[in-house]
Image (cartoon, rainbow, N blue to C red):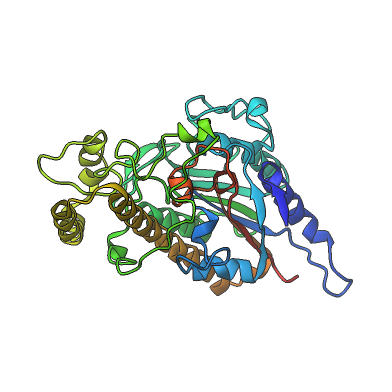
Amino acid sequence: MELNQNNLLFTIAGTALLASCTGTEKTVNTKPLNIVYIMTDDHTRQMMSCYDKRHIETPNLDRIANNGVRFTNAFVANSISAPSRACLLTGKHSHKNGKIDNITSFDGSQQTVQQLLQQAGYQTAMIGKWHLDSQPTHFDYWTILPGQGHYYQPDFITPEGRKNHQGYATNLITDFGLDWLENGRDKKKPFCLFLHHKAAHRNWMSDTTYLKAYEDKTFELPTNFYDDYSGRKAAKMQEMSIASDRDMDIVNDLKMLRPGVSTRLSEQYIQGEYARLDSAQKTKWDAHYQPIIDAFYASGLQGNELAEWKYQRYMRDYAKTIKSLDENVGRILDYLEKNGMLENTVVIYTSDQGFYMGEHGWFDKRFMYEESFSTPLVMWLPKS
């Protein structure tokens, strides 16, 4: 099925409202459907087993696809975080909604899907990554990450102010979502919960629970990993190369922290995500990574061997963040099922764009090939 993501949420909202008017005389559904909209950051179709079985298993995401619909041709309008999100909320392209980059503030006074849902009697909640450099509008409840947010001990902003929370962002965002579903809403009204995760954004910091996951796996190298970009000058100039130490940083991106080793982004890692680990987390982190660090610097890898080693480390770290996402999607599905809500709730899972997993020798998303502009999109649809 093909879908332009600009109109995704408007289509789903309309479907949820119309559902109360559908069915036979004996099976008519008199309730508007609830909506749980889960958006992740930089999660690509290649790393979901309902799309691609080469790399990892995502059983809970597959649960959604197997009980509803899997879109095979879903594309974003603008393959970078904030503009993509603005397109989804407004149903308008970036030049129309004004959010043309990650810096410009989003104009929340324009019509958005959450506004229309509120007008139709829905409760709306926004939890997690907002990333629009503005205060959320037309949400009955919101708690958001500032900017990109952090994986560990993240701050969250609410109408009451800013507060730090102990834990891992993917788990916390799910915790807050479950708490709102259980304690924060009027259970007599339909709802739309926007659950927006930081993962799987660069620099792919795993939950310490999953540090050892995929360490024994060798990921298949894309056939065009060594693309020579023949006849494609613009592609050749992109700064997304896994092989390039300037693009994919050994310390910040691959966690090869060592005294005396300074890279372009090493201080960003040391003073940023690594510094946010608490003592127990840091003990686990160092115990896992130190043998890998020692082996890497002892190996003296160069050229293609180094590029392929970096690819494997990148894939493993990225896959670990997806494992946490999949587990937490399962927590949401289990809650809805336990409370008898799945048969009156549309569950949507998508990402703000795709991502390069070694195709053309790249990571990131900032070039107009299918790996970047395509996005995963699966929906759980009530049988009624």
Where, quadrant-wise, is the C terminus in this rendering? bottom right
Q: Position of residue 305 (x, y in %)?
A: 29, 53
Residue closer to the observer: 346 or 305: 305
Image spot of residue 119 (x, y percent): 71, 42
Image quarter for residue 282?
Answer: bottom left
Residue 208 in view of the camera: yes
As rendered, which of 181 and 362 lies closer to the eye?
Answer: 362
- Residue at the image point whose x is 52% and y is 68% from the top: 53
**Viewer-proximal residue, 179 or 245?**
245
Residue 341 appearing in the image: no
Which residue sits at x=67%, y=47%? 9
Residue sitting farthest toward the right: 25
Measured along the vertical axis of the image, is residue 341 above or below residue 252? below
x, y percentage for residue 54?
Answer: 49, 67
Question: At 67% across and 67% down in the image, what residue appears?
Answer: 68
207 lies above or below 159: below
Is 4 left or right of 219, judged from the image as shown? right
Res 345 quadrant in image: bottom right
Up/down of 256 relative to 270, above or below: below
State the quadrant of the N terminus. bottom right
Count numbered badges in the picture.
0
77 relative position to 228: left or right: right
Instruction: Kindly give the residue lying farthest to the left in the view shown.
Output: 259
Q: Which percent across, then down, holds residue 378?
A: 62, 60
Indicate the quadrant where residue 293 lies.
Answer: bottom left
Residue 178 vertical placement versus 384 (above, below): above
